[in-house]
Image: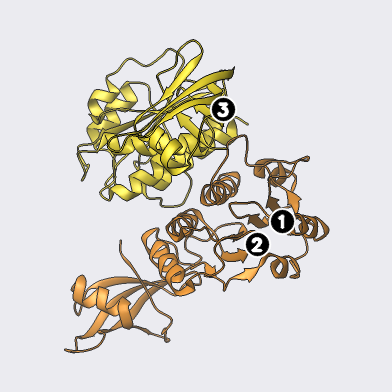
Chain colours: A orange, B yellow
Amino acid sequence: MELFYSKEIGKDTVLLSGQEADHCARVLRHKEGDTVFIIDGEGGLYRCTVLSVSLPKKGNAEVSCRIEEKSAGVGVRGYRLVMAVCPTKNMDRYEWFVEKATELGVDRIVPVISEHSIRTTVKKERLEALVLSATKQSLKSCIPVVEDAVSVKDFLLRDFEEGALKLIAHCEEGDKRTVRDYVSASQKPLNVVIMIGPEGDFSQKEIELAKERGFLPLTLGPSRLRVETAALASVSEIYFASI
Amino acid sequence: MELFYSKEIGKDTVLLSGQEADHCARVLRHKEGDTVFIIDGEGGLYRCTVLSVSLPKKGNAEVSCRIEEKSAGVGVRGYRLVMAVCPTKNMDRYEWFVEKATELGVDRIVPVISEHSIRTTVKKERLEALVLSATKQSLKSCIPVVEDAVSVKDFLLRDFEEGALKLIAHCEEGDKRTVRDYVSASQKPLNVVIMIGPEGDFSQKEIELAKERGFLPLTLGPSRLRVETAALASVSEIYFASI
């Protein structure tokens, strides 16, 4: 099943435009009468019939569809997860994490810049395109939000929801617990925030601030993991802990 | 800490040759008197002192080292894991899986070719190079074995060790359990074999044969995961279940 994405949703109709319409009409060659499935990115899945297809010589196609049936809450999880992960020096690796985190399940991805970060900027639009693509491929109806990059300090100074389980994976010594341990001890439904540091670990100041802001120390076991591997292992652990 | 790899290990000395020596002597410019750490790929880690460096104009360097201290069982896990995963159409994705599985922990990777596989060949040397690199980067002393590609059928007809926990992730209906469930019910130490199918799932015949050969049906939760994501999520689950 192929999914398309649109925010142009009316009472009875949905309009596909831009790249979504091009993929639908030019690549997959859908035509009047075909059934297509469209997500609104916020939990809604629409089974539609194509009413008309516009294929201009220049510019994007346009596909107008009639809504036959709407399903809500498709692929919605019973937990909320925010991943605040330092961008990796090699952006391929971060993109890999973003794609796989979307497949498994994540609500919000925040590129956080540490004092120790080698990479200090990200191409948000590129990450958003990956997230959209992975959302459709994995048949989910909610598209994770990708935020603009923000400093670790500014992220830590945010107000987090009451009861949020806030975890930070750093390399300092100390009493750390696994995702599974923390989840078992937490109230449900889960509302989790996990921070993963850069190649050189968070700075002393950042770790101290995290502690002050109620972030608990997370261990990802004995293996020495790359940033993106640690991040994905965390997403995976929350996912399986919630099955 | 940078690790090097050699099989040329004597009673008191280790010889680095080939690309390992080039990296040591030409890239990192190690010289006589420097301390270097060398793994033998089978659990041994050697702290050595560089005795001499040969830098010919043409051909690989050679670095001769004196063993100061040997540690055994470095980074060795308490479980054994064989991942039999169908190669993905896009080899980049399979290579990501191989690298990340090595970081987390795996003993053997078997590219298995299903009746439904799109990709039917792999470049084993390329995968072995990735595995070696990931082993050194993640400071492990055991290098996972990458096998030649084999058909799913031939893999299933092998004799597996008594007591091995054999799992297969397929998309057919039925009573499936998670990695965590199976691990809890298994005798320790764990000896696990996990099979992950191709994009179009294993064939009916392959699933039947797996059942006959004692492979239990594995669920990876409600999300629709790509091959490499499903494979890595499984490796991650075994890893965390064993902490």
According to the picture, the residue beneath numbered tag 1 turns out to be A203
Q: Secondary structure at mark 2?
A: loop
Residue drawn at the location 34% of the way across and 41% of the way down: B172
Across and down, in percent, residue A219 comes to 67, 42
According to the picture, the residue beneath numbered tag 3 turns out to be B75
Q: Is residue B106 visible?
A: no
According to the picture, the residue beneath numbered tag 2 turns out to be A114
Tell me the number on the disc at residue A144.
none
- Dividing the picture into quadrants, the one containing residue A50 is bottom left
Residue drawn at the location 29% of the way across and 46% of the way down: B88
Q: Specify the subunit that label 1 lies on.
A: A
Across and down, in percent, residue A88 comes to 52, 58
Looking at the picture, tell me which residue is in the foreground, A194 or B186: A194
Looking at the picture, tell me which residue is in the foreground, A138 or A147: A147
Residue drawn at the location 40% of the way across and 58% of the way down: A138
The amino acid type found where label 1 is placed reads Ser
C-beta proximity under 8 Å, tags 1 and 2: yes
Q: Is residue A96 visible?
A: yes
Across and down, in percent, residue A36 comes to 29, 71
Q: Secondary structure at mark 3?
A: loop
